[in-house]
Image (cartoon, rainbow, N blue to C red):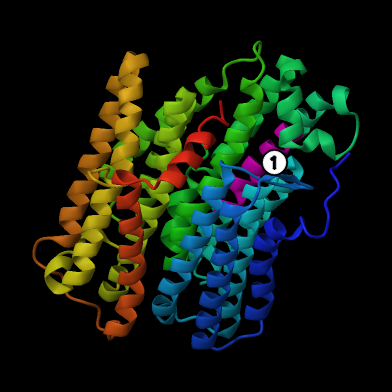
Amino acid sequence: MLPEVSPLDFPLPWAVVFLPWLGALLLGFLPRERPAALANVGVSAASFLLALALVWHPGGVQGWTQVDALNTPLVVLSFLIGLTTAVFSCGAVAAERFDAPRLRAYHVAFQVFMGAQALALLADNMGVMWVAIEIATMASVLMVAVHGTPPAIEAAWKLFILCGVGIALALLGTIILYLAAQPFVGHGDDGLSWTVLMGLAARADPGVLNLAFVFLLVGYGTKAGLVPLHSWLPDAEAEGPIAISAVLSGLLLNAALHAVLRAKAIVGAHADAVAPGRFLLALGLASLLLAAFALWRRRDARRFFAWSSIEHMGVAAIAFGLGGPAGNLAGLVHMLGHSLCKSAVFFGLGHAVQLRGSQKIADIAGLCTSHPALGWGLAVGIAAVAGLPPFALFASEFLLLVEIAGHYAWLVLPVGFGLLTATAAKIHTLQALCLGAPTPDAAAPAAGRFEEWFTLGPLWLHLVLALLLGVALPGPLAGMLGVAAGIPG
């Protein structure tokens, strides 16, 4: 039976979910660009403050939700990026040239996505989590397709088909995991609870657990951008509205990987089940190496950084595949750092694309000369994404390599080679985009100084937070991440 929840205990996790959805209803009635953009910021700011309150939440399971050290940082980060993306969108949405119906669809889908993202992270019920990730996927499809151009429709269709295959596999894995619990809890919601499943995992049939994990890993791994069903990600991030690249790369991938970690904890709790870390390690290494080489062949800037997302999800998967306190901590810091740094890059790159009128790397040269504030901000962001010190991704990759060198020496060569190859590609792209002789701006008037601060504010805020995460992790956050590192096993 589900635990009884009093009215006083119920609201906060569900309020975090439903506030964006209520905001979506409001935004559906605002056809004008500036009021809609400002209302989107207002809803996002209120949602972020509500999510921040989860830090002081007592935690534990409440009905279909749970709050713990693993999902709380991810929820707060999600709404922070949602807020900064909404602010960036204030300056960028005019260049998208939406008509009134498309403007409504864009803002409504954005807030629906944010609510579904929160529910996916906060759900204790596997079925609710599956539905939430499916809602987030459908909202993503709408946001990618909103321009209605042939490339956008193709990218949205690819996202729908490949992630549809993934979500179907994840549903099958969910059903199998429910069957593993049924002999102990019978029919009902208890068999879908992550918390209940953790308590009985050691007594469940190991063969059923193994089968469930394979389907869950491949299914949710598709959403996380892991090889082999990864090819939707470059198209989606290249063809959708510029602001959406930040939330796809920084949020949806985290929610999917979080689902994999919950499943890993359950399977890993059974001594006779296969070690789930091996599967994560294999997919992570394949993703890292494939993306590292693919980066050298990209000529479209947005596709380049979408492939970088595949690489970084591979690195996080390797860290969680190694497991243990150090490996899991490296993976968690990597997830947080990647979300902050990559969304910062997409903010800067999005503004540059609007200025130059092209996404081609060759057409966006010399930003540090032509637009110094934007150019140097983007250069620092790319350096952070490349894993250079002193940002969070350097700290997580260093921690990962130390763990590998100490316990898994055979991994040093492939992981080190993949990281160096990817880093070199990003430094090469940094030079191409930010240095050298500048290319001309597009014939259309460039964004004014006021609009540029909508880019620079979120960009530098993310980089400052990534810097703090890398060199001066606050004590309470360090303690929370330490507890979270023990959950995936």
Task: State whether the magenta stretch is mostly helix, strand or loop.
Answer: helix
**Where 125 falls versus 14 (above or below)?**
above
> Residue 389 is drawn in which quadrant?
top left
* Residue 224 or residue 120, whichever sits in front: 120
The residue drawn where x is 24% and y is 41% is 423
Give the structural element (helix, strand or loop) at label 1.
helix
> Residue 437 is drawn in which quadrant?
bottom left
**Where 471 falls versus 191 (above or below)?**
below
Residue type at mark 1 is: Ala
- Crowding at mark 1 (Cα within 10 Å: few <14, some 14-19, many 20+): some
Q: Is residue 137 visible?
A: no
**Residue annotated with mark 1:** 168
Please indicate whether residue 165 sits to the left or right of residue 327 in the image.
Answer: right
Which quarter of the image is occupied by the C terminus?
top right
* Spot occupied by residue 257 in the image (x, y as percentages of width and height): 54, 40
* Spot occupied by residue 439 in the image (x, y as percentages of width and height): 15, 70
The residue drawn where x is 86% and y is 47% is 4
* Spot occupied by residue 223 in the image (x, y as percentages of width and height): 56, 44
The residue drawn where x is 44% and y is 60% is 245
* Residue 111 or residue 163, whichever sits in front: 111
- Was residue 86 drawn as part of the magenta stretch in this picture? no
- Residue that protrudes farthest toward the top in the picture: 272
Which quarter of the image is occupied by the N terminus?
top right
Please indicate whether residue 469 sits to the left or right of residue 99 in the image.
Answer: left
* Spot occupied by residue 106 in the image (x, y as percentages of width and height): 56, 72
- Was residue 171 drawn as part of the magenta stretch in this picture? yes
Please indicate whether residue 411 sits to the left or right of residue 483 in the image.
Answer: left
* Residue 270 or residue 214, whichever sits in front: 270
Magenta stretch, residue numbers: 159-174
The residue drawn where x is 17% and y is 56% is 432
